[in-house]
Each structure stands twice: as structure tokens, then as C-alpha cells.
Amino acid sequence: MNTALLFAPIALAAATFAAQPPAAPVPASAPANAPAEKAAEPAPPAWHTITADSLMAIIRKLPAQRSGGGRPIVPEGTKPPALDDAHRQGLVDTQWLLARKAIDLGYEVRLEPVPHSRRGEQRTWPYANVVLELPGWGELADEIIIVGAHFDAVPGTFGADDNATGVAAALEIARVLKDPAFSRTSPRRTVFFSLFTLEEAGLIGASRHVDYLTLRRLIPTMDAPPEAKERIAAGPRVVMMLSLEMLGFYSTEPGSQRNPLAMLPGAPNLTVGDFIALCTHSTHAPINARLERAMLAADPLVRTARIDQFPSPKVPIFPPDLLRSDHGPFLAAGVPGIMVTDTANFRNPHYHTPGDTPETLNAPLYERTVRALAGAIWNIALDPEPFPAPSGQPTQP
């Protein structure tokens, strides 16, 4: 038997197999109980880019002398510090610093002149409000939200809480709203960031701002005829104003919060200074509730306290302590003005004193408050629910 012929097919087959490229390895199948790959984490909202560091950096850059008036708290028998030209020039320098910051953020800046001189003075100082405008789009563009904060301080104080915290918050929220996820969304409301001068001298800057808005027919005058009020209600108009008034001082100690309203029927019982208060006239309580809901949606852990129970049938007056900020002139013009505040001297022992420095602020809780406000403004500006038409009637008693 010829064994060569017998094994020839086997040899041919072996040669053919050897000439072919090796087959690709078959991947092993995953075990049946292997965990599925995790989906990519959603990106955090844009307002989470606001940090304690970014806020404190703005606060520390504001000039220490930026006063056009106001009354500091001084020990009994001590003469208040003189309001000299260095303070006034510091206030003028601050408005230009803020204007440059706004331009760096990509905003066009409107400087509203607020000329002012104290009694007996010859010189009128060129004070001005600094206004940043972010135009809206679509059918919501005619509704304007104003985010306001005063940038002056009383003589002899740095004014960290009062009110560098409000100014830093407004600028950081303005930065966040330039994010394309917001600025390129339609429809959305128009947002003004209005930085006021001369609050400590008697709400002068905010009052002048209301005058300018009235001239632009964005706020109806009290004595306007009904047809004029109807035209404003049908066109661009201010629907909500937030006054950011001292946002950075908090305490978790029992008894750290004084509550001058506690004796009034319906007032909240507040004894611990770990919340941010939202204060307005009872006429605007629904809008205040809308703001609170939006803040809690942005951060469920932020602690808020709505104070919008007055006037009421049992308390027919509006407590004067709830008018001590730049929302007051807006309430007087019939605009829903809301003061957002850490309650000032009812919590902060450094109010209007040289002790009001950046080191006294609670940076983590301040950051949380500003983030919640930024998220609230973002969402309210995009919310299709309409605001009520302006009544044209004052809401300040």
C-alpha cells in the first residue's frame, strides 16, 4: 500500500489551512449577571459654576470707600466718621469698576445719571446707576425681570454684607445667564441687572431708576389715564423686581435671629438665622411664592422664609422694616418688588459698623443662596406662565 497516497489529502488540507490567515478571536460573552454600563452623568446646571470663591473675589475687589451718605452705627458719644471727598470719589470709582466688569461679561451698559449733592455743598457728584440689559426673545420678551442691588456703603465701613454680597450675586447671576443654554433659548423674558447708587442716602438711586423706567413706559405712572395703563400692560413692562439686600450672614445658633414681627398675627416664628427672607407686600404674595418655589426647585436644601402676610385684615399696616431697601420705590409704583435678605441688623451684629468685613460672611451658605437665586431667575425667565398685568396702583401704604 502506498502510504504517501494515503496521507496526501491530509497533507494538502494541512497546507491549505496553514496558508489561511488566523481567524479573529471570538469575544467572550459577558456574564448574564454583569452590571450594565452607567449612563453618562448629566452636566450640572450652569448656576453651579457660581462658587464661594468667585463671589468673594468680587467682594474683595470693591473699593473699601464707596459712600455717598448713610448713617453708620457708632458707640454712644462718638462722632460719626466724616463723609469726605475720598468716600464720594470711591463711590464714583465703583460705578466705573462695575461698568467695566459688565462689559467684560459681554453686556452693553447703561449709565443712568443720579446727580446729587448734600445740603450746603457746592459740588454735585456724578453718581450713576449701572444697568445691564439682557433682551428677551419671542412672546415672553415684553415681560421684564429686574435683579437689583445697591453698591454704596455707609461711611467708615467696608460694607461686605451690606451690600457687596448683593452686588457680587447680581454680577455672578448676570454671568450665568450669558450661558448659551439660556441666552439662545426662545421664548424667554428680558432681564435687567440694575446696580444702584445712593441707597444708604435714602433709596435715591432706585427712585431715579423707577423714574427712568417710567419715562421709557415700562412702568405706568400712578396718575396715567386707563388707556395709557392698558397700552403699557400690552407692551414691554416690568413684572418683577428683586432687591438683593445683604445675602451673606448666617448663624445656626438658637436665638441668633431677632424677629420684630413676632408679635404680629400671622407672622412666621423665626429664631435661628440660617435662612434667606423673601419680603414683599401681601398683594404680591403669589409672585413671592413663585420665586420661593423656583429657588427650592434649583436647590431643595436652601432655607427660605416668605414674609408677605402684611397688610392683612388683622394687621392693616405694612411694617416699615419691610421697606428698607431698593424694592420700596418699585412697590410705590405698583411693581411687585421683593426684598431678598439675610434680615440685616436683625441677625448681623456688624450691620453699619467697621466690623462688616468679608471675614464675617458664611461663604458656603451664601454660595447656596446665590445658586438658588440664579436657578430661580433662569427658570422663571423661561417659564411660559404669564405674570399678571400691572395694576398701576401703589402697593406701598
Image (cartoon, rainbow, N blue to C red):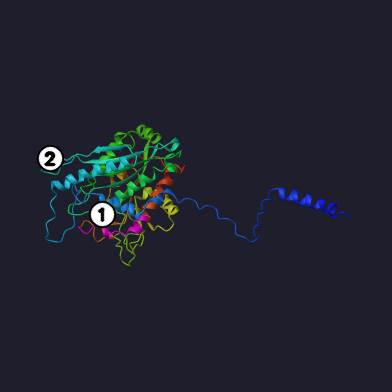
Point out the tag, 2 or 1, that comes first from the N-terminus. 2
Q: Secondary structure at mark 1?
A: helix
| Label 2 Cα crowd, 10 Å radius (few <14 / some 14-19 / many 20+) | few
- Horizontal placement of 64 versus 285: left or right? left
Question: Quadrant where the N terminus lies?
Answer: bottom right
- Relative height, residue 365 to residue 334 (above, below): below
**Any mark on residue 351, and which?**
none
**Any mark on residue 123, and which?**
2
- Relative height, residue 78 to residue 385 (above, below): below
Residue 264 visible in this rendered orientation of the protein: yes
Q: How many marks?
A: 2
Residue that lies at the very extreme toward the bottom in this rendered image: 254
Q: Secondary structure at mark 2?
A: loop
* Amino acid on which disc 1 is placed: Ala
The residue under label 1 is 160
Can residue 355 be found in the magenta stretch?
yes
From mark 2 to mark 1, how far is it between C-alphas? Answer: 28 Å
Q: Report x, y in % for residue 57.
A: 29, 52
Q: Report x, y in % for residue 31.
A: 65, 60
| Label 1 Cα crowd, 10 Å radius (few <14 / some 14-19 / many 20+) | many
Residue that lies at the very extreme toward the right in this rendered image: 1
* Residue 273 in which image quadrant: bottom left
- Relative height, residue 263 to residue 232 (above, below): below
* Amino acid on which disc 2 is placed: Arg
Say which residue appears at 43% left-offset and 55% top-offset: 299
Residue 267 visible in this rendered orientation of the protein: no
Write down the region rendered in magenta: 354-367
* Residue 234 in which image quadrant: top left
Q: Report x, y in % for residue 145.
A: 37, 42
